[in-house]
Amino acid sequence: MRTKPTRRVCVLLPNKQHLDCSVRMRARGQEVMNAVLRQLGVGDLQVFGLALLRDNEYLFLDLKQKLSKYFGKIWSRKSLSVPFILFLRVKFYLESGLLILSSKVQQLYYWELRQKALHSQSRHQEALFFQLAASALQADVGDLEEGGEDKQDSMQYFLPEDYFPPWLINHRGRNFLLQHSPALHGELRGLPPSRAILQYLKEASGLQDGALTFYRMKQVKKERGSSILLGVALTGVHVYQGVEGKQCALFFFTWSDIEQLTFQGSRFEITAVTSLGLSKLVYYTHSAFHSKHILRHLSDSHRFYLNTKDAASYIQQLEDMQTCQLHKEAYICDMACLRQRLRCRNLTASECSDMEETDTPWTEDEAEKEDESPPSEDEPEELFVDDPAEVSWLADLLYGVSVDGPLALPSSYWAAVNMEMKQVLSLRGDEGVSVD
C-alpha cells in the first residue's frame, strides 16, 4: 500500500519547549492545533492561537485554511529534512488569570507574559518590574527562607536576566537587583505558587506594552522604516509612534469607539465614530497578506471581548469584594490577626488548624457592639448590578478552590462563557475530574 506523504511541523511553546507533529500534505491549521491539544492533554487552549513568523512579525493562522497557503511552494517539495515552524502564542489577553480554566494553559499564559515583561520598554513603570520579579520568584522557587533577605549568599539564588529587562539591569546594576529583590520576594512568604502566578498575571496586565499584540505599520507607503505600532488589546486598539527611539502613545480606541476597520492591499484604515471628531487614520502594512490577518485578529479580539466581558465583570466584582473585606478587617482588628487570617487562606485546612494561634481573638462584646451600631443615614446602600446572593455564591466557589486543583468540565468555548463558567465552577467543588 502506498504511503501518503506527510509533513513535519514543530510548534514552539512560550516556555521554550516544543512539540513535534506529523500532518497530511493537505492538512489545515486545525489539524496541527488538534495535535497540540492531544500532546498537551487539554481540551481547549482558550486564549492561544497558532502563528507563523512573516517579515519578522507574528501572524495568527486561520485554522480553516490549508497550511500550504502559509508555507508556499516549499510545502510541496518531496524531500524535506527540516520541519516547518509554528508558534503557540497568546492571541487574546485577559485582565485576570482566573478566566483560564486549565492550570496547564494558565502556565503557558504565565510564561508568555514573562517573556513580554523581559522585552518591555515601559521605562516609566520601573517599580512594577520589581513587583513582577517578586511574584515570579515566589511562583518559581517558592518561599524565601526565614531571614534570607539579610543573608549575603541568598543574593545568588536567581539570575536578574531571567526576571528584569536588559535596560533595567543596565540602569540599576546586577548587584542592586540581587540585593533588593529578596526583600520583596520575602514579603510573599506563604503564598502558594498557583496564587503567585495569578498575582503575576494581574500585575503584568498593568504593563503599558505587556498585554498587547503589536503590528508594525508605516505612515506613508514609501516610508523606509515602520514608525507606527498598532497594539491589539482586550478592550480595544492602541496606536503608538516611534520618536527618537521611544514609543509615544497617539490614540487608544475602545471597541465602541471604532466605526469601521478596512483594508485594500497594504492600505489599512481605521474609522472612528463621529463623536470623537477624528479624521480617518490611514496606515500601510507590509502586504495585503498582513492586512488580511491583522484585520482577522482585530475582529476575533472584538468577538472574544464581547463573549467574555460578563465573566470578567463577575471576576472583577469578586476581587473588589475581597479587597473591601480586607480593608474592613484591617480597620476592626489588629494587624497580627489580619496576617494570620491571610496566611490561613493560603494554607490547607489541616495546616491552618495546626498553626499556633498568636493573633488577638475577637471578644463577644466587640462583636455585639458592631452588630448594634446603626447604619449611617448619610451612607448610601451598596448597589449590585447582579444579585448579591449570586455573587457571594460564585465567590465562595471561586476562591474556595485552588487553581491547580481538579476541574470538572472541559473548558468552554466562549460563546456562553458566563453561564458555562458558573457550571464549571459549581462542578469543580462537587466532582473531581480535571480538564487536563
Image: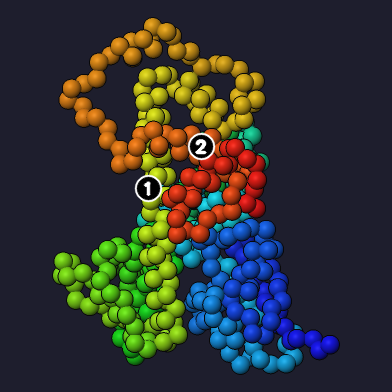
What's the residue at 36%, 9% (across, down)?
Answer: 368
Q: Is residue 16 left or right of residue 2?
A: left
Mark 2 belongs to which amino acid? Leu
| Place of residue 290 in the rendered image (x, y in percent of width and height, measured from the top left) | 44, 82
Dot 1 or dot 2, earlier in sequence: 1
Residue position for label 2:
397
**How far across and down, in percent of the image, does residue 130 sit?**
48, 48
Horizontal and vertical percent position of residue 412? 52, 55
Kind of residue sitting beneath label 1: Ser
Seen in the picture, residue 232 relative to 43 is either above or below; the reply is: below
Q: Residue at x 60, y 24 (%)?
A: 352
Crowding at dot 1, Cα within 10 Å, few <14 / some 14-19 / many 20+, comes out as: some
Name which quarter of the figure residue 288 lies in: bottom left
Q: Nearer the viewer, residue 434 or 367?
A: 434
Measuring 33% from the left and 70% from the top, which residue is drawn there?
240
Evaluate whether residue 225 shows in this view: no
Quarter assignment of residue 366: top left
